[in-house]
């Protein structure tokens, strides 16, 4: 036979009493424990929140400070924008003022020029023609031009007089045969003594045996007598107008003294053999002609034989 899950017997008071006395006690105990546990959890959570807030009392203050700093930065950016805008306006105003001042100056200068031109026209003679921005010719410029003209005339006169002096030259020795030609800035010549071609020979060598008389080519003054390391005994005569003549490889005994005035054709010394640079060459004298600070080819002014 199958047993029924629920009996048909009614729930009696005695059974309820037994349930309360035995099983109900445990149920009530369980509910009390559960209530105590939930209340304990709630109390602990509240205590934890309070402890956290008490342990971090500066958190709210920090949030306030952050907010205030953020607002301060916004205020600064706005102020800088306003200041830059104000500066731009000031710069524009200054530029406009400068431009206006410049325009005023230009207009004033133009007015002055116009007034000056009018006054010049009024003061000028009918034949005068006014030229704007022209510089007036002063007496100083005129004096400078006169001095330049005088100098040019003098240079022309000196050149013509020096040319006349050169054209009056005579040969310093008889025969006038060239043994070594002029080669300064010209074709080189061969030197027996140096055994090489020379392009720095500033005069000509004229054949002259030792003891041959050497004469002044033109009137002049003896300005120098010396023993030259290259050309031996050397006499220099100043003929004026920047013209000079030089005589080298002379005998050590000469017939003139320094500062002595000599005449054209006057004997000044004799041919020797004192030029070290030309000691192995044929007997001769070394002859140079200078015009100012430049040497010139003597063949242009004396008669020579080659």
Image (cartoon, rainbow, N blue to C red):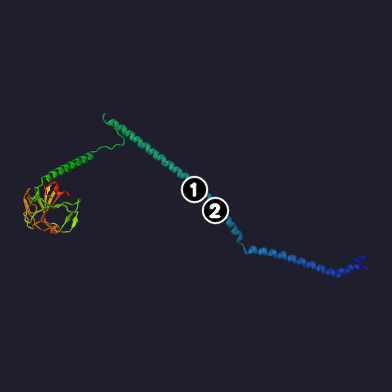
| SS of the residue under disc 2 | helix
**Residue at image coords 70%, 65%:** 44
| SS of the residue under disc 1 | helix
Q: CA distance from mark 1 to mark 2?
A: 16 Å
**Residue at image coords 58%, 57%:** 66
Work out whether residue 272 or residue 14 is closer to the camera in this orientation and state it: 272
- Is residue 135 placed above or below 236 in the rendered structure? above
Instruction: Work out which quarter of the rendered image holds the N terminus and state it.
Output: bottom right
Point out residue 135 in the picture as x, y percentages from the top left corner.
Answer: 28, 38
Work out whether residue 297 or residue 59 is closer to the camera in this orientation and state it: 297
Which residue is situated farthest in the bottom direction here? 22
How many discs appear? 2
Point out residue 91 in the picture as x, y percentages from the top left corner.
Answer: 45, 45
Q: Is residue 64 left or right of residue 91?
A: right
Which residue is situated farthest in the top direction here? 126
Point out residue 17 in the picture as x, y percentages from the top left corner.
Answer: 88, 68
Few, some or many residues within 10 Å of mark 2 (<14, 14–19, 20+): few
Q: Are marks 1 and 2 in contact (CB under 8 Å)?
A: no
Q: Is residue 69 left or right of residue 262?
A: right
Residue, disc 1: 84
Among the two numbered marks 1 and 2 on one chain, the one whose residue lies closer to the N terminus: 2
Label drawn at residue 112: none
Query: Which quadrant of the view contains residue 138?
Result: top left
**Residue at image coords 41%, 40%:** 99
Which residue is situated farthest in the front direction here? 306
**Residue at image coords 74%, 65%:** 39
Residue, disc 2: 73
Q: Is residue 6 left or right of residue 269?
A: right
- Is residue 264 placed above or below 53 in the rendered structure? above
């Amino acid at each position: 036979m199958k047993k029924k899950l629920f009996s048909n017997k009614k729930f009696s008071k005695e059974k309820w009493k037994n349930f309360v006395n035995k099983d109900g006690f445990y149920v009530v105990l369980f509910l009390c424990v559960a209530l105590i546990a939930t209340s304990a959890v709630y109390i602990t959570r509240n205590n934890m929140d309070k402890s956290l807030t008490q342990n971090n009392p500066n958190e709210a203050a920090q949030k306030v400070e952050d907010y205030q700093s953020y607002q301060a930065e916004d205020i600064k950016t706005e102020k800088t924008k306003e200041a830059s805008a104000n500066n731009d306006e000031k710069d524009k105003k200054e530029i406009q003022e400068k431009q206006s001042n410049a325009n005023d100056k230009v207009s004033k200068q133009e007015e002055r020029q116009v007034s000056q031109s009018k006054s010049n026209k009024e003061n000028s003679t009918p034949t005068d023609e006014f030229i704007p921005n022209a510089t007036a010719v002063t007496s100083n410029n005129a004096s400078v031009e006169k001095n330049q003209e005088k100098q040019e005339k003098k240079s022309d006169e000196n050149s013509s007089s020096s040319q006349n002096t050169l054209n009056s030259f005579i040969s310093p020795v008889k025969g006038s045969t060239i043994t070594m030609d002029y080669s300064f800035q010209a074709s080189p010549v061969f030197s027996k003594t140096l055994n090489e071609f020379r392009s720095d020979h500033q005069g000509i060598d004229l054949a002259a045996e030792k003891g041959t008389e050497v004469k002044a080519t033109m009137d002049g003054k003896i300005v120098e007598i010396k023993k030259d390391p290259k050309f031996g005994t050397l006499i220099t005569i100043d003929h004026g107008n920047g013209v000079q003549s030089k005589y080298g490889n002379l005998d050590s005994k000469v017939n003139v003294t320094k500062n002595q005035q000599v005449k054209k054709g006057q004997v000044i010394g004799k041919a020797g053999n004192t030029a070290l640079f030309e000691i192995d060459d044929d007997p001769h004298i070394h002859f140079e002609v200078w015009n100012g600070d430049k040497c010139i080819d003597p063949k242009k002014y004396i008669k020579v034989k080659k």
